[in-house]
Image (cartoon, rainbow, N blue to C red):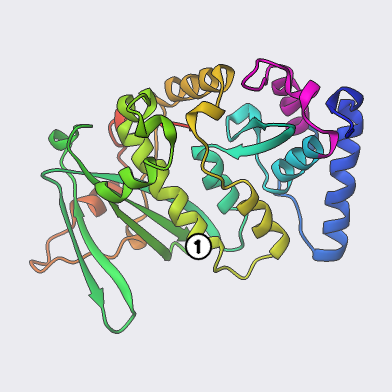
Amino acid sequence: MAETGLVLSKEDAFNNVMAKIAALEKNNGIKLPKNYSAENAINSAWLMLQEVVDKEKKQALEVCTKTSIVEALYNMVLQGLSPSKRQCYFIVHGSKLTLMKSYMGSIVATKRLSGIKDVKAFVIYEGDVFETVFNNETYTIEFNYQPKFENINSNKIKGAFALIIGDDNKLLHTEIMTIDQIRKSWGMGIAYKSGKSNTHNDFGEEMAKKSVINRACKRFYNTSDDSDVLIESLNNTDEDYDEADIIENAKEQVHEEIKANANQEVIDVDPKQVTEIDNNNNENPIQKDLNNKKTEKAEQQMMCEF
């Protein structure tokens, strides 16, 4: 029978993880992000693990194998994620502990790739102007986005789009999803299918942004030239989880994150990151907002972490 987390101390977990990271640094040239403390992250994770339970309310450290616990912590450190910043959570699947990236965790992990500055997402509502056209010379989708504050309505979402921005403020990737595509991605979960998903009902905007960001990030890093080891780690923590797998303690952390982000200022994208279509040569409203570094309505920027 495999050893469980009961035989694993925090110090042993840290030493096991750092040994694997040291081997990667030596053989693959992978380096942890600057200002990232693996020790602090593991300390936070260990505290979190004391509260993580499975569906039968048994503690994760009691039922999960020692190997899976070390692997989950290793994936966390390799991706530069911090539990204390609610960038990741731990989920029990049988006897295996797995790492689940949060909304912000997907962004942070993608920024581990070379040349990535940021990832942004916006919700499109009925009444907003959103026009796309294919550029035959650059083989890219260009768009004109003109949102209006009075259009914000969680019951009238038309879609969402995400932008992946490079270090030189160049737009590297655009992902656009209609509301039907978003709902189809939600429909993979049992809770949403049954109509019992309070998260999707209460925080539709945030769930829409999460869906489009996850798709954008996954498509982008699976076509990148970065280390296969890092890409494998990103893919290993990219599972779609049913709400049934996310027990109450994780849900409480998620809702606390929503409250914490409600009053958070978010600086918009630099205008060079957005390609516009403007037949009248008028300044695109989104670019005007970007230039002035205005913030969006707090409700539109809350981050849901399922």
In the rendered image, residue 85, in percent from the top left (x then y), is placed at 59, 30
Q: Compared to 100, does 256 lie above or below?
A: above
Magenta-tinted stretch: 40-67
Q: Is there any visible trace of residue 300 in the rendered image?
A: yes
Examine the image and state in which quarter residue 39 appears: top right
User: Residue 132 or 98: which is nearer the viewer?
Assistant: 98
Look at 34% across and 80% down and name the residue there.
Answer: 138
Examine the image and state in which quarter residue 10 appears: top right
Q: Mark 1 Cα within 10 Å, few/some/many (few <14, many 20+)?
A: some
In the rendered image, residue 123, in percent from the top left (x then y), is placed at 28, 43
Q: Compared to 209, does 85 lie above or below?
A: above
Q: Compared to 96, does 258 lie above or below?
A: above
Q: Is there any visible trace of residue 291 in the rendered image?
A: no
Look at 51% across and 39% down and name the residue there.
Answer: 104
**Residue 29 sits inside the magenta stretch:** no
**Residue 44 sits inside the magenta stretch:** yes
Disc 1: which residue: 220
Q: Is residue 1 left or right of residue 248?
A: right
In the rendered image, residue 155, in percent from the top left (x then y), is placed at 19, 32
Look at 69% across and 22% down and name the residue there.
Answer: 48
Q: Is residue 163 left or right of residue 51?
A: left
In the rendered image, residue 161, in percent from the top left (x then y), is placed at 32, 52
Amino acid type at mark 1: Phe
Q: Secondary structure at mark 1?
A: helix
